[in-house]
Image: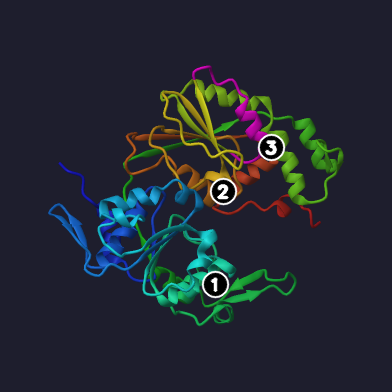
Amino acid sequence: MSKPFLYEHQMKAVEKGFNGCIFNGGVGSGKSRTGLFYYFKENGGWIDENGYTPMKTPQDLYIITTAMKRDKLEWEGELVPFLLSTKPERNYYKGQKIVIDSWNNIKKYRDVKDAFFIFDEDRVTGYGAWVKAFLKITKKNNWVILSATAGDRWEDYMAVFIANGFYKNKTDFVDNHLVYSRYQHYKVDKYINTGRLIRLRNKILIDMDFIRPTTAHHEDVYVGYDTTTYKQVMRTRWDIYKNEPIQQAAGLCYILRRIVNSDEKRQMKLLEIIEGLTVPRAIIFYNFDYEREILLNLAYGDDYEIAEWSGHAHQPVPDSKKWIYLVQYTAGCEGWNSIMTNTIIFYSQNYSYKVMTQAAGRIDRLNTPFKDLYYYHLKSRSGIDLAISKALKDKKKFNERKYTGWDK
C-alpha cells in the first residue's frame, strides 16, 4: 500500500487553513509539508493518488526559517514533491521566484508584494525589528506560520493578532489587555479581557493533533555532586573558578550549575547509559562550553565516531554504526532531525520548557523506524537542579533571581 501524500492530521489542517493562520503542530508532525500543500492548494494545485495537478496561478514563494534549516537545505528537500525549486532551471513553473532565507534577513523582504510567505518556527514575539518587518510583509502578501510551541504569554500573540487585523497596533493591544506593574518597568501585572484573547487565539491556531506512532520513555537519572563546595558557594557567593565575588544572580547560578554538572559521577553515569544502549548511537544535549570540553574528552570507546553541532563546529550527524552527536541547546535544539537513533541524553537541563521540547523532537519524527524512544535526563538533587526541574514540569522558564533571592 502506497504512503499517502499527506497524513490525515495534515490534511485536516490544510482544510481548516486560511490566510494568517498558525499551523500548530508538535515537533515531528510534518508542518513543513502541510504549509507547502496549503500554499499549493491555494494556488490551484493538488496532489493525490491520482497524480499531480499543476498550480494555475503560482505566486512567488518566500520561506522564512531558521539559519540552520536554510543552511542544511531542508526546505529544498520539502519542495521536491511539489516540483518546486529555488533554482529556476529545476522549477516546474517558469518565471516563479522561490526564496528560502533566515529570520535574520527578514527585513530584506519588507517591500515584496503579492507573494506567499511561510514563516517557519514562530519568531514574531515582542515588538522588535523582526516583528515590524513581519507586519509590513503581511499587509501586502498571503502568509501562514508554522509553530511547534505556541506562545506562553499573551504578548507572544500580539504581532499575529495585529497582522490579522484584530488590533490596529501595539498600543491598541496593550490598552485592551495589559496592566503594567507600578513598581517594575514594563512588567505585566495582570491581563484583562482575556475571554477575547482566548477566542482570537482559538481562531488562528490550527492544531495538528495526531496519535504518534512512537512511545516516549523519559527517565530521570539522579547523580551525586560536591555538596560541600555547593553549600560554601551558596553561602559566601564567591566565584571559586575566578577567585572573586559573584556580582549577579546569573553568575551565582552559573557557578552552582558548574559544580553540579562537572562532577565525575555525572560523567560516569553518562558512560554507563551509553554502554547499555541497544542502538549504539546517541544525541547528547548540553548548555555550557565547560560541558562541551568534558563531553569531547570522555572515553566512549575507540569505535565511536564523535561529531557536534555548536557555536564551535557545525558537523552533520555521523553516518557510521556507532556515534555520539553532541549538541549545544541554543545552537541546535531545532531545525534538524535524525531517524538513525532512538536515544537522547540531556547531560544538563535547559532553563526553557520550549527548548527542551524542541530538543526532544529531534528524534520523534513521523518517519522514524523506532517505536520506542528513550530520553535520559541527568540531574542531581541539588537545590538548583530541583528548582529547574520544577519550572520545566510547570512549563515555565527558570527564574535565576527568584531562586537565589538576589533582590533580597
Q: Amino acid at mark 1?
A: Lys
Is 299 inside the magenta-drawn segment?
Answer: yes
> Is the residue 386 above or below the residue 36 in the image?
above
- Left or right of 79 on screen, residue 163: right
Secondary structure beneath label 3:
loop
Q: Residue at x 70, y 30 (%)?
A: 225
What residue lies at 69% left-to-right and 31% top-to-bottom? Answer: 262
Residue bounds of the magenta highlight: 286-303
Sequence-wise, the earlier of marks 2 and 3 is 3
The one of 115 and 195 positioned closer to us in this rendering:
115
Q: Are marks 2 and 1 in contact (CB under 8 Å)?
A: no
Return the x and y of residue 354 as percentages of the image width and height: 52, 52
Task: Give the label on residue 382, or none.
Answer: 3
Q: Nearer the viewer, residue 262 or 202?
A: 262
Foreground label between 1 and 3: 1
* Residue 221 can be seen, yes or no: yes
Rendered residue at 36%/74% (across/down):
114
Which tag is nearer the camera, tag 2 or tag 1?
A: 1
Q: Can you identify the residue that label 2 sits on?
A: 392
The amino acid pointed to by label 2 is Leu
Residue 40, given in percent of the width and then of the height, sits at 27, 62
Q: Which mark is residue 132?
A: 1
| Label annotation for residue 394 | none
The single residue placed furthest to the top in the displayed view is 302
Q: Look at the picture and state if 296 lies above or below 105.
A: above
The one of 306 and 126 positioned closer to us in this rendering:
306
251 w.r.t. 303: above or below: below
Q: CA distance from mark 2 to mark 1?
A: 31 Å
**In the drawing, does residue 49 fall left or right of residue 372?**
left
| Relative height, residue 3 to residue 95 (above, below) | above
Residue ID at (70%, 51%): 400
